[in-house]
Image (cartoon, rainbow, N blue to C red):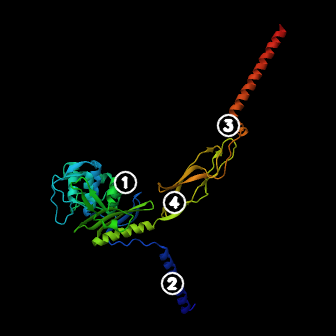
Amino acid sequence: MSGRRVGALLAILLALLACGSAQAAKHRSPGPHVLAKSWALIDGRTGEVLTSHAGNERRLIASTTKLMTAYVAMKDLPLGKIVEAQPYEYEFGESVMGLQPGEKISVRDLLYGLILLSAGDAAHTLAIESAGSVKKFVAQMNRYAAALGLTNTHYQNPIGLDSKRNYSSALDLAALTEELEKIPAFAKIAASREATLRSLHPPRRIKTINELLEMAPWVTGVKTGHTWKAGYVLVGSGSRHGIRLISVAIDAPTDETRFSDNLELLEWGFKQYHRRVALPKGKELASPTIRYSGGQLPLLVGHTLKVAMRADQKPAIEVDAPAEVTGPIRRGARLGTATVTVDGLRAGSVPLVASRPVPAAGAFDKVRGWIGEHLLALAIAACAILIAAMLLGRSLRRIRLGKRVQ
């Protein structure tokens, strides 16, 4: 084969390979484009990690430290409790509520200030009210971190001030937020764009500094953080079509990019879930027997059920239906339920309906059914009667023979 032909064949082969690579790239889902130095995205319902970069790397986390402050305070203090604000010397540029020493305020309103404003004076007051001192409260924070399995987390203060011993990781922050969002009161606070602090006199209106909440209607939180050493930090979350995601970006280059990074992570995550048919209408899932008249009644899926799931997930179906039914039953009558779960989480349910009508059983059917249900007992009774009759007959014959002999 000439060199020219070999060259032509190689060119064709390279073209085919390039075409195949282009097609594969076309169908392959690109990862999120994130500028932060460490980031993570998890399914907020299961804790499953969807994607991450340097997710276990220990880093300074600034005011996202206050997530654990909120967690400990909500475990130890009633939300409605009225407390006195503690004296607090804040650093230049630090976020505060501006509480006056001795000012009365509820724990709930302190938590609003803590999360929406990232208020250091709120964190300080909560720490002292909860544990008696900041030192004891920090010890509590570290005990809770250990109990939650946050192996790349340690706290030195409840505020988030820079310290080599105050650190966490993107995946640990996501896991902590997963636990926090299981608490309805926290979830409500974190998702709030603004709040009125009614325990203060006069009541005070505050607005969140978390700009992520203004970037999409489905965003549900959670917490900002920034120091010169930690960079720009943000823990975000969102909920769409029953899917709840938690995102984390640590050490983003600018204030704007920490928000855009989290929005990118959440939007990418939601795109991984697609609504697929889990149960088509008319699918038979149960066949209870029909009492008296016999036979079976197929139960069908009442309407198509679609659920959101990723390509690597498969739905599981749980059927709750009777083993036996009795007429009269009209066609389409609801007689059971099918529930679809994905990774153990309920994704939806549909009714199971009768595929055909079943008339009421007649007297003959009921008698026949009763005989069928008690056939064994009747057989045993008949045998017992037969045996008793045979024994009685033998006894009578013996008596008669005895009389003849006499």
| Residue at x 41% of width, y 69% of height | 268
The residue labelled by disc 4 is 314
Q: Residues within 10 Å of mark 2 (few under 14, many from 20)?
A: few
Please report contact status of discs 3 and 1: CB closer than 8 Å, yes or no. Answer: no
Q: Which of the pair 346/83 is nearer the observer? A: 83
Regarding mark 1 in the picture, which secondary structure is present there?
loop
The residue labelled by disc 2 is 14
Per the model, the C-alpha gap separating discs 3 and 2 is 76 Å
Q: Quadrant of residue 389?
A: top right
Answer with mark 3 or mark 1, whichever residue precedes in sequence: 1
| Residue 172 visible at all | no
Residue 315, compared with residue 30, is above or below; it is above
Answer with mark 4 or mark 3, whichever residue precedes in sequence: 4
Please identify the quadrant where the N terminus is shown: bottom right
The residue labelled by disc 3 is 373
| Residue 96 visible at all | yes
Regarding mark 2 in the picture, which secondary structure is present there?
helix
Residue 298, compared with residue 312, is above or below; it is above
Q: Amino acid at mark 3?
A: Glu
Please report contact status of discs 3 and 2: CB closer than 8 Å, yes or no. Answer: no
Q: Position of residue 221 (x, y in %)?
A: 34, 62
